[in-house]
Amino acid sequence: YSDEGYDLPQLQLHEHIIDVDERMSKQAGLLFAFEAATLADQRAVKRDTITERVEMAARLANDSPEQWLVFCDLNKESKRLAMLIPDAVEVTGSDTVEHKESSIIAFATGERRVLVSKSSICGFGVNLQQCHNIVYAGSDHSYEKFHQSLRRCYRFGQERPVNAHLIRTSADGRVAHNLDRKRIEHELMVKGMVKAVEADIGRQRIDHVENVR
């Protein structure tokens, strides 16, 4: 069948790196301002760079009059983002179902300019393709959350290039490497599945022709 119209828009990934200086490294309990090696170190860096990451995410959303979808991982990040972005609506796990529904609908219809939430809450299932700007105030090792949340805007029917802004620290090298590895493995798996389906369709066509004969 024809795949006309099923074209994904251009995806532009923008990486913003916050340098972990000596002060931040000491706050996080690191001896030096190097790459955070363990999960405990990575959590400590995330916790102690909240201010810098949130302020950068807020600047991105505030500097543009367009709609923005802002994802974060921690409750403190969500609360501060909602305070720093005046016209944002915040959706948290503890909100009522009615608040979640009305907030997401208000963003989807353009009534609200910015939606702040965790990718585990608003990153799955909903269609937010009216928006083409996403910012991640932080990152973790879950490629599934990143892929699914990105697809809220980067999907068939999106008519504009999608800008995804990834805010990381200079100590997040292992997290970034792990996500890149998972992304490459996912792309290889998808290509393999497509080839398998095409090969199966080809065999079915041959069998059909032979049966007709």
Image: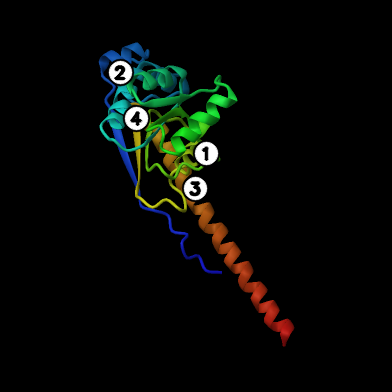
Sequence-wise first label, 3 or 4: 4
Could you classify mark 4 by the number of other residues whose Cα lies within 10 Å: few (under 14), some (14-19), or many (20 or more)?
A: many
Where is residue 162 drawn, in percent x and y?
36, 46
Q: Residue at coordinates 37% horizontally, 14% vertically from top-left?
A: 28
Whether the residues at callouts 3 and 4 have beta carbons within 8 Å, the answer is: no
**Which residue type carries mark 3?**
Glu
Q: Is residue 170 visible?
A: no
Between label 3 and label 2, give the one nearer the viewer.
3
Q: Residue at coordinates 65% horizontally, 78% vertically from top-left?
A: 206
**CA distance for labels 3 and 1:** 12 Å
**CA distance for labels 3 and 4:** 22 Å
Instruction: Determine which of the numbered discs, if any, sits on residue 168 in the image.
Output: 4
Q: Is residue 103 visible?
A: yes
The residue tagged 2 is 32
Label 2: state its secondary structure.
loop
Q: Residue furthest right?
A: 211
The residue tagged 3 is 185
**CA distance for labels 2 and 4:** 18 Å
**Which residue type carries mark 2?**
Phe
Sequence-wise first label, 4 or 1: 1
- Along the line of sight, the residue nearer the viewer: 48 or 56: 56
Could you classify mark 1 by the number of other residues whose Cα lies within 10 Å: few (under 14), some (14-19), or many (20 or more)?
A: some
